[in-house]
């Protein structure tokens, strides 16, 4: 079983800079701490873009400082808030193919494919140009030829997720990519970008999206105004085998008091010990 941690939309700014009144540095530090404490047996942490809020080099350096303490290897993708040149300056060793931040990683019979959907000319839409589509086609074909199932990671969802505000911010001209995944049927598709925790299936292909580390968007299917709401940072724990993918949505509990523990008993009922007495009862 392959354990992969999915983190997304960290939106880091330069040191000391808040984003929408939140401190993305502190939120990412909490997530990194939780991964190190509870999931240091994972094979990889994948961070699916919007690594920074403005794409400047100082923000990438600040981001690098925080993720450098991860105990597990990590792979970084770009989102619409990122800047490819500045990213590559800050992460000169990050895998790059054909000039894009795209790569693969094989773990036994599983191939993870990491796509670069950063659009060259649009602030919100995603893009997979012919070069990137050709590369993806080769990567997923090679996986099939070597008996591997693929899990693809991309910042932008390649189809509608039923939320009006995102209709103009998904992958531009998605048909070629959708044709490729229809033909090759990856085991699972993972994306970020939405700031919503969303899962489902498209044409038989399961997908998951975590709402991420930074600001959360209040779900509104038809709203014209986007509301950002206070919420804890989150991440996903993925257990992957060629037979399927399990996704747990979770969040750091460092700042959460344990209020009770339940111990197993022979009769299956469990023995519960409450650690924090309700104020009204005391
Ligand atoms: Fe984002
Ligand atoms: Fe995004």
Image: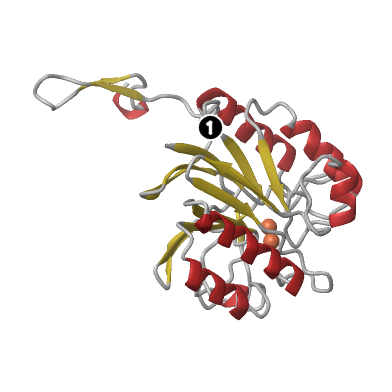
Q: How many marks?
A: 1
Residue 14 visible to an observer of this rendering: no
Residue at 36% across, 49% down: 243
> Looking at this rendering, what residue extends furthest in the left direction?
267
Task: Answer above or below: position of 164 versus 259.
Answer: below
Q: Position of residue 187 (x, y in %)?
A: 45, 57
Residue at 84% across, 54% down: 55
Q: Position of residue 274 (x, y in %)?
A: 30, 21
> Looking at this rendering, what residue extends furthest in the front direction?
145
Q: Position of residue 162 (x, y in %)?
A: 50, 75
The N terminus, quarter of image: top left
Question: Which quadrant of the figure has residue 199?
Answer: bottom left
Q: Colour scheme used in the picture? A: secondary structure
Residue 211 visible to an observer of this rendering: yes
Q: Position of residue 223 (x, y in %)?
A: 56, 76
- In the image: residue 224, left or right of residue 268: right
Q: Which residue is mark 1?
A: 42
Task: Answer above or below: position of 97 versus 41.
Answer: below
Residue at 59% across, 80% down: 175
SS type, badge 1: loop
Task: Answer above or below: position of 171 versus 275.
Answer: below
């Amino acid at each position: 079983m392959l354990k992969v941690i999915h983190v997304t939309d960290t939106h880091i700014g330069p040191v000391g800079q808040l984003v929408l009144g939140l401190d993305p540095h502190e939120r990412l530090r909490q997530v990194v701490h939780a991964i190190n404490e509870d999931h240091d047996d994972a094979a990889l942490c994948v961070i699916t873009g919007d690594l920074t809020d403005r794409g400047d080099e100082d923000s990438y350096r600040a981001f690098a400082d925080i993720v450098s303490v991860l105990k597990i290897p990590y792979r970084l993708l770009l989102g619409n808030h990122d800047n490819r040149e500045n990213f590559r300056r800050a992460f000169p060793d990050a895998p790059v193919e054909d000039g894009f931040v795209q790569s693969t990683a094989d773990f036994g019979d599983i191939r993870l494919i990491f796509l670069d959907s950063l659009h060259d000319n649009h602030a919100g839409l995603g893009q997979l140009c012919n070069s990137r589509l050709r590369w993806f086609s080769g990567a997923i074909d090679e996986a099939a030829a070597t008996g591997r199932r693929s899990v693809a990671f991309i910042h932008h969802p390649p189809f509608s997720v039923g939320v009006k505000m995102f209709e103009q911010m998904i992958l531009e001209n998605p048909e070629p990519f959708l044709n490729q995944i229809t033909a090759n049927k990856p085991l699972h598709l993972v994306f970020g970008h939405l700031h919503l925790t969303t899962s489902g299936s498209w044409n038989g292909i399961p997908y998951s999206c975590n709402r991420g580390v930074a600001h959360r968007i209040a779900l509104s299917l038809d709203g014209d105004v986007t509301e950002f709401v206070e919420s804890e940072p989150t991440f996903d724990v993925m257990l992957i085998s060629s037979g399927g993918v399990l996704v747990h949505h979770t969040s750091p509990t460092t700042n959460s008091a344990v209020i009770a523990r339940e111990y197993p008993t022979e009769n299956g009922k469990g023995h519960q010990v409450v650690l924090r007495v309700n104020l009204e009862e005391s």
